[in-house]
Image (spheres, rainbow, N blue to C red):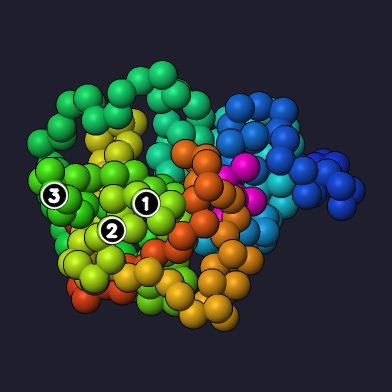
Amino acid sequence: MSAASPVPNMPSTTPQEAGRTAGRTDLGRRLAARREALGLSRDELGRRCGADGRYIAYLEEHAASPAIGTLLRMADALGVTVDYLTGAGAERVAGRASARRDSALVPLDETECRRLLNTHGVGRIAIFTPEGPAVLPVNYLTAGPDIAFCTSAEAVTATAAGTEVAFEIDNIDDVTATGWSVLAVGELDAVTDPHELHLLDTTARSRPWAGGPRNHWMKLTPARITGRRVVHDS
C-alpha cells in the first residue's frame, strides 16, 4: 500500500482517539509520539511526506506494514530514522551498517538546515572550558533565528556566555546507510529580556532531561549554518 493510497473501510476516529499518543503497534506509538512532540497534526505530517492524513491515522491506530519508501518519507519528515520508527534500533549502536559503493556526500543549504533543526530536540554544544574543549548534550528549541536551551547558572555552558561556540545535530539510519548533520556556529549569550524569557518558557515542550534547577536560558545566534547529507546514486 503506498503512502498516498486511501485505506479501505478505515473506521472513523473520535476526537479523543485522534489526540492520544497510543497506537496498536510500536510503529503506531512511535509515529504518534514523534508527530505530537513536533506539534504536527496528522494532515500536516501527511502533506510533508505525500500521504493522506487518514492514512497517518490508520498507521497510528492499526497494525500495518507500510512500504520502505513510505517509512523513509515519514522518517525524513519527522527528522528521525526508519529504525527509530520501527523500534528496530532501540538496543543497537547506530552507525555500524556497511557503507554502499554508490554513496556521496552533498551539502545542505541553510533553509534545509533550519528545517532539520526544527525536527530535533536534543543536540550537542561544543565550548571551551578552563580544562579544555567540551562537547555536551542539551535539550534545545529554535526561537526565530536562534537556538536556545535551558541550563543552570553554574553550568559550564552558562559560563561560556560571550564566546563563540558550535552546535551540532545529526541523524544516522542503518537501514539505508544514510545520514545527515547540521552545524551552527556563533556567539552564545544568556537570555535576560523578560519578554524573551517568557516566550521561551511558554514555547518549551519539556524541561531539560538532566533535571534539577535548570532555569537559566542561553541562546546561540548562528553566524553560519552548514549541513551535509549522505545520499545514494541509485
Q: Pointer 1: what residue?
A: 154
Q: Position of residue 127 (x, y in %)?
A: 20, 54
Rounded to the nearest angstrom, the CA distance separating label 2 from label 3 is 10 Å
- Which residue shows up at 71% across the image and 40% down it? 21
Q: Amino acid at mark 1?
A: Glu
Instruction: State the image quarter where residue 112 is shown.
Output: bottom left
Q: Amino acid at mark 2?
A: Thr
Q: Position of residue 9 (x, y in %)?
A: 82, 41
Q: Position of residue 134 (x, y in %)?
A: 19, 45
Is 12 positioned to the left or the right of 223 in the image?
right
Q: Pointer 2: what residue?
A: 159
The crowd level at tag 3 (other Cα within 10 Å; few <14, some 14-19, many 20+) is few
Report whether residue 12 is seen: no
The crowd level at tag 2 (other Cα within 10 Å; few <14, some 14-19, many 20+) is some
The magenta span reads: 33-38
Are the residues at dot 2 and dot 1 in contact (C-beta closer than 8 Å)?
yes
Is 11 positioned to the left or the right of 213 in the image?
right
- Which residue shows up at 15% across the image and 32% down it? 99
Q: Amino acid at mark 3?
A: Pro
Which corner quadrant holds the N terminus?
Answer: top right
Label 1, secondary structure: give it: loop
Are the residues at dot 2 and dot 3 in contact (C-beta closer than 8 Å)?
no
Residue 130 shows which numbered tag?
Answer: 3
